[in-house]
Image (tube, helix red, strand yellow):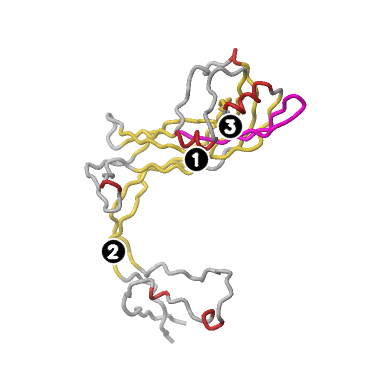
Amino acid sequence: MPKQGFCEQFRESMIVNSRRVYDSCATKDYLENYRCYFTESNQAIIDQSTSVRPRAVSIIDVDINVEPISFRKGFFSIEQNFFFDVGMDVSFSKTSSNLNSLCIFSKNSTMFGSDSNTKIFSSDSNLQQSFGNLPRAVVQVSDPIILDSSFNDVTYADDLGKIPVVPDKIVDYFGGPLSYLNVSKYVNVTMGLFSITHLERDVQMLVPSYDFGRPTKECNSGIDSKDEFNQMNFPLDSFFPPLGSFCSVEVNK
């Protein structure tokens, strides 16, 4: 015998603004012998240290820059600069210390992001800045796996004369200026990194509509309330505009 049930077929088609992924790729990077940068006070400890052991590594931030490739329409160059906080145990003068340092990894990828000649203006954007000509690059990355670390004397350093570009927010994260030159020794680390990169654009999509995404359970506030209030049902209908009556379907036993 048929009975009434929740409508399992979509009610209507509607246009929604969403982000469509045009290209994506997964990368496994082996970062061998990347230099760590310390604050000036910590670098003084490194200069006197005799051994180093990696403790942990975490991601501070990833700076992403997207540029169109002039000779390949619809393709873009994605520059990614990874900033890591590398913790290590350092031994010196019969004592040990836990130090944190900055490690930087940069790479470029070429991906398809489609082509757009339009500009989009939003009422909630600052100064009505336009966006939409360039696709949006998104990088998902897990904390790296630290594999090895070692000391290197400055006489074998090829990159001590190169000062990396470090954003102010990264310098502030370590609480002071970092030492790049005039050091006696520096530390190299080797890590394994897994990341996923994709390019997406804002698009208008026609999708089937079933119902609002209503919560299925109530949050536990942890506050003792009146019994009468605890027994009240959550007023979901107050949070969602009415759609009219539910449609009915026949469900055969």
Front residue of 142/26: it is 142
Q: Earlier in the sequence, mark 2 or mark 3?
A: 2
**x 41%, y 67%: residue:** 213
- Farthest-out residue, bottom: 1
Q: Amino acid at mark 1?
A: Ser
The answer to whether residue 14 is above or below residue 55 is below
Q: Secondary structure at mark 3?
A: strand
Residue 9 drawn at (x, y percent) = 36, 71
**x 33%, y 54%: residue:** 18
Q: Give me the C-alpha separation between circle 3 and circle 1.
A: 22 Å
Magenta highlight range: 81-101
Secondary structure, magenta segment, majority class? strand
Q: Amino acid at mark 3?
A: Ser
Confirm or deny contact between disc 2 and disc 1 (CB under 8 A): no
Residue 1 drawn at (x, y percent) = 44, 87
The residue singled out by tag 1 in the image is: 195
Q: Secondary structure at mark 1?
A: strand
The residue singled out by tag 2 in the image is: 14
Residue 37 left/right relative to 127: right
- Farthest-out residue, right: 94
Residue 146 left/right relative to 118: right
Residue 90 among those drawn in magenta = yes
Bin the neighbour count of mark 2 within 10 Å (Cα to Cα): few under 14, some 14-19, many 20 and up. few
Q: Secondary structure at mark 2?
A: strand
How many numbered circles are shown? Answer: 3
Q: Amino acid at mark 2?
A: Met
Residue 6 among those drawn in magenta = no
The residue singled out by tag 3 in the image is: 101
Front residue of 111/213: it is 213
Q: Earlier in the sequence, mark 2 or mark 1?
A: 2
